[in-house]
Image (cartoon, rainbow, N blue to C red):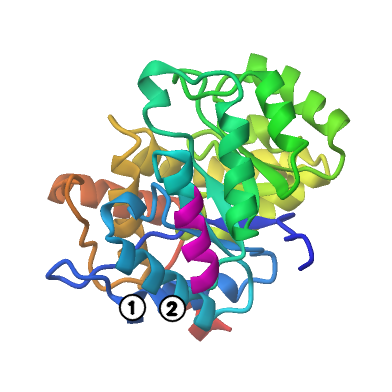
Amino acid sequence: MPTMDLRGLSPAPVTAFTRDGEVDFDANVRIAKWLASFDDVKSLVILGHAGEGTFLTEGERLDLIRAYADAVDIPIVAGITGEGTKVAAEEARKCREAGATGALVYPNHGWLRFGFQKGAPQDRYKAIWESSGLQCILFQYPDATKASYDLDTQLAIAAQEGVVATKNGVRNMKRWYVEIPELKKAQSDLQILSCHDEWLLPTMFDVDGLLVGYGNIAPELLINLIKAGKAQDYPTARRIFEQLLPVTRAVYHRGSHMEGTVALKIGLRYRGILDHATIREPLKDLGAAAERVIEAAFEAAGIGRVEDLMAAE
């Protein structure tokens, strides 16, 4: 199978539910087809944080992969979140059988608190690749966590068979400006993807693409932002960044990054993609006042309803 081309936008879609909390496959297919309709959307990354992936049962996760794979012709990347290495490898194998092409490999979540032993992350990626054949994306967590990999660990993972890209969310520009050039120098084919949803501009000029939850709600603008970054066109990138800023603040500059998932669904409802913004516990509704702020941010940014855009065409 050819290597996934992720040099563009890879949205991380939310998971749509019915009003009574079940997975709404029709609504999820609608999201998938809308996002995949953009030429520069390269993959759809499901079952991660934005997709409430760890809040779904195994059967729901696999059925969602099948629904996405049947609906669109671009790669489906599954978030692999199982704790133990053997568990994650088995999870990946099942995701491949359901139709996934790639794996966004989350760290063992125990590492967030306690840190990781040297060599354990490399073994996790190796086991997932050997068990499933899913093309792996190295997921670099924020510098503030103990699951953020040091440069040597990143280089070792990037050199392994089956690793085709890195989704970097280190959120420490001192590390970014040191480590990203080293990764590029060591592995020239490694695709560099930023996931700094809340402030994308500083990373935009060093990347091949974006892998972001933000891609749910404003794919049109993010595609243009990527193009401006690749062209090293700072004035255009800055203009798009400023246009997006009201939405960025309303969705991502919140008390908890987890609230961003709730806000994404409110944004999709505003755009006419979703009928409602139902979420699963432990997420909580943001309240009517916050919903008004989010909707006003879309208006301020000039981001309209999707059916209005389609009608204008």
As drawn, is 53 to the left or to the right of 140? Answer: left
Q: Residue at x 30, y 55 (%)?
A: 295
Q: Residue furthest top?
A: 174
Q: Main secondary structure of the magenta part?
A: helix
Alpha carbons under labels 2 and 1: distance apart: 7 Å
Does 241 lie within the magenta span?
no
Q: What is the x, y in percent for residue 163?
A: 71, 46
Say which quarter of the image contains residue 24: bottom left
Which secondary structure, mark 2? helix
Which residue is rendered at x = 47% and y = 64% of the image?
94
| Magenta-highlighted residues | 89-98
The 10 Å Cα crowd at callout 1, few under 14, some 14 to 19, many 20 or more, is some
Of the image marks 2 and 1, the number of the one nearer the N terminus: 1
- Contact check, label 2 and label 1, Cβ < 8 Å: yes
Q: Which residue is mark 1?
A: 25
Indicate the quadrant containing the C terminus: top left, top right, bottom left or bottom right: bottom right
- Residue 6 x, y percent position in the rendering: 70, 56
Q: Quadrant of residue 82?
A: top left
Is residue 205 something one can see in this rendering?
Answer: no
In the rendered structure, find residue 70 and report the number of the disc placed on it: none
Instruction: Compare residues 159 and 40 and report the one nearer the observer.
Output: 159
- Can residue 216 be seen? yes
- Residue highlighted by disc 2: 67
> Under tag 1, what secondary structure?
helix
Please name whichever residue, 291 or 301, is drawn nearer the observer in this view of the structure: 291
Q: Amino acid at mark 1?
A: Phe
**Percent position (x, y) of residue 262?**
28, 50
The amino acid sitting under disc 2 is Ala
Viewer-side residue, 36 vs 4: 4
Q: Quadrant of the N terminus?
A: bottom right
